[in-house]
């Protein structure tokens, strides 16, 4: 626990040249490679195991603090169940870290809060990270991550600025994987701004590029993003025209099954809507997103012969979940479903209350931003 300043004083008084052991130099190189693997989405798990070899052989506080930073980043990336506050004491040892490593520290704490749907908290830590000078890699990733959380809480002007900065940096690095990923994020922003045509155009390009780069999880995510575009634009037939290719490429992804069911429901084909929501419900264990679990279960009940009270309760539970995750788009989506539900059952008072909530939620969206059609 000795401070960096006192280490320097002690070494100076004893006339010892200030340097680290060879094992620490080797660790430094491998730490940097580990970070590169995170940035470039290579095999960062394998590179972390390489760092793990040094855990019992690190003799300086310099490398040990960096090892803990690597451990934190690794655990967050693999969605491990961790108590993030266990790592906060690293702040006391910033003197041991280079500036870009401090950026990484705050950036990945932000990512942790993002994964837990706490976007305001995430942005607070991204802003802390921006107070330090990162290198090209860490700064680009920071802008990328911040753009995502800003989009979730509808601060779209800032989100777009961050996305463009990240994209420019990824272009300079010739980082194709991240370049396509940030294009995907730009498509998400266009969708939030209701520019569905532009979002669709970028998503279709991203699907082909992700396939070229063999990024299968990203292919699935982009189909989900594309189908969400179509739902927001009420272009349900477009979902059905692409459902077979989407299911094939995504291996029957649960979210895509839900979107297909919802499209059939909107087109009054209740038989096929029930068929696909049943498939989604049967595979619900494959996802960890509580909001999607709740909405699939609620939609399954909505299409069933259950009582009005049971349907209302299920829908209200999804609404509560959507409020917790601080994502206005998901709240609007479930409110639209609830509004139609009350209309169907002639619950005029509740229908009007739902309209008021919808109006309040729409007012939270930043529509002041005007997009340049040539960007993206």
Image: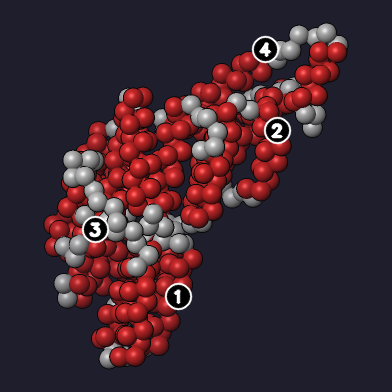
- Please indicate whether residue 85 sits to the left or right of residue 195 in the image: right
**Which quarter of the rendered picture does the N terminus lie within?**
top right
Look at the numbered discs 1 and 2 and tell me whether their residues touch, using CB distance below 8 Å: no
Q: Earlier in the sequence, mark 2 or mark 4?
A: 4
Determine whether 269 is above or below 194 in the image: below
Specify whether residue 58 is in view: yes
Residue 231 rendering spot, x and y as whole percentages: 23, 63
Of circles 1 and 3, the one toward us is 3
Q: Which residue is mark 1?
A: 317
As drawn, the residue found furthest toward the right would be 14
Circle 2 — which element?
A: helix
Q: Nearer the viewer, residue 295 or 189?
A: 189
- Ranked by sequence position, the earlier of labels 2 and 3 is 2
Q: Earlier in the sequence, mark 4 or mark 3?
A: 4
* Label placed on residue 33: none
Q: Earlier in the sequence, mark 1 or mark 2?
A: 2
Asked if marks 2 and 4 touch (Cβ < 8 Å), the reply is: no
Q: CA distance from mark 4 to mark 3?
A: 56 Å
Q: CA distance from mark 1 to mark 3?
A: 27 Å
For residue 93, the mark is 2
Question: In x, y percent, where is residue 37?
Answer: 46, 28
Q: Name the foreground residue: 202 vs 153.
A: 153
Residue holding disc 4: 22
Neighbour tally class for label 2: few under 14, some 14-19, many 20 plus, Cα within 10 Å: some
On the image, numbered disc 3 is attached to which residue?
Answer: 194
User: What's the CA distance linking mark 1 and mark 2?
Assistant: 44 Å
Q: At numbered mark 4, what does the secondary structure look like: helix, strand or loop? A: helix
Mark 4 or mark 1: which comes first in sequence?
4
């Amino acid at each position: 626990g000795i401070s960096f300043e006192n280490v320097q004083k002690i070494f100076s008084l004893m006339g010892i040249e200030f340097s680290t052991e060879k094992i620490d130099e080797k660790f430094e190189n491998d730490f940097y490679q580990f970070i590169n693997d995170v940035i470039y989405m290579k095999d960062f798990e394998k590179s972390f195991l390489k760092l793990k070899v040094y855990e019992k052989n690190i003799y300086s506080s310099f490398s040990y603090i960096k090892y803990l930073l690597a451990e934190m980043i690794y655990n967050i990336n693999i969605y491990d169940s961790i108590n993030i506050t266990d790592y906060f004491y690293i702040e006391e040892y910033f003197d041991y870290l280079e500036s870009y490593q401090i950026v990484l520290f705050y950036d990945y704490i932000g990512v942790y809060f993002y994964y837990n749907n706490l976007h305001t908290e995430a942005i607070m830590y991204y802003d802390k990270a921006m107070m330090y000078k990162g290198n090209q890699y860490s700064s680009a990733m920071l802008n990328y991550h911040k753009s995502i959380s800003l989009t979730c809480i509808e601060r779209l002007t800032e989100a777009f600025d961050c996305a463009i900065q990240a994209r420019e940096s990824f272009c300079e690095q010739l980082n194709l994987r991240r370049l396509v990923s940030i294009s995907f994020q730009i498509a998400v922003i266009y969708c939030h701004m209701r520019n569905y045509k532009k979002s669709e155009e970028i998503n279709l390009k991203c699907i082909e590029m992700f396939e070229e780069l063999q990024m299968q999880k990203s292919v699935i995510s982009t189909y989900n993003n594309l189908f969400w575009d179509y739902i927001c634009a009420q272009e349900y037939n477009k979902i059905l025209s692409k459902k077979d290719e989407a299911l094939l490429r995504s291996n029957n992804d649960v979210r895509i099954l839900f979107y297909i069911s919802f499209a059939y429901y909107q087109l009054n084909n209740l038989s096929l809507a029930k068929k696909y929501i049943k498939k989604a419900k049967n595979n619900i264990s494959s996802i960890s997103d509580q909001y999607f679990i709740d909405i699939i279960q609620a939609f399954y009940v909505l299409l069933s012969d259950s009582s009005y009270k049971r349907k209302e309760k299920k829908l209200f539970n999804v609404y509560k979940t959507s409020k917790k995750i601080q994502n206005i788009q998901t709240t609007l989506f479930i409110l639209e479903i609830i509004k139609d539900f009350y209309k169907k059952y002639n619950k005029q008072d509740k229908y009007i209350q739902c309209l008021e909530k919808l109006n309040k939620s729409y007012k939270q969206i930043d529509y002041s931003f005007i997009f340049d059609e040539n960007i993206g």
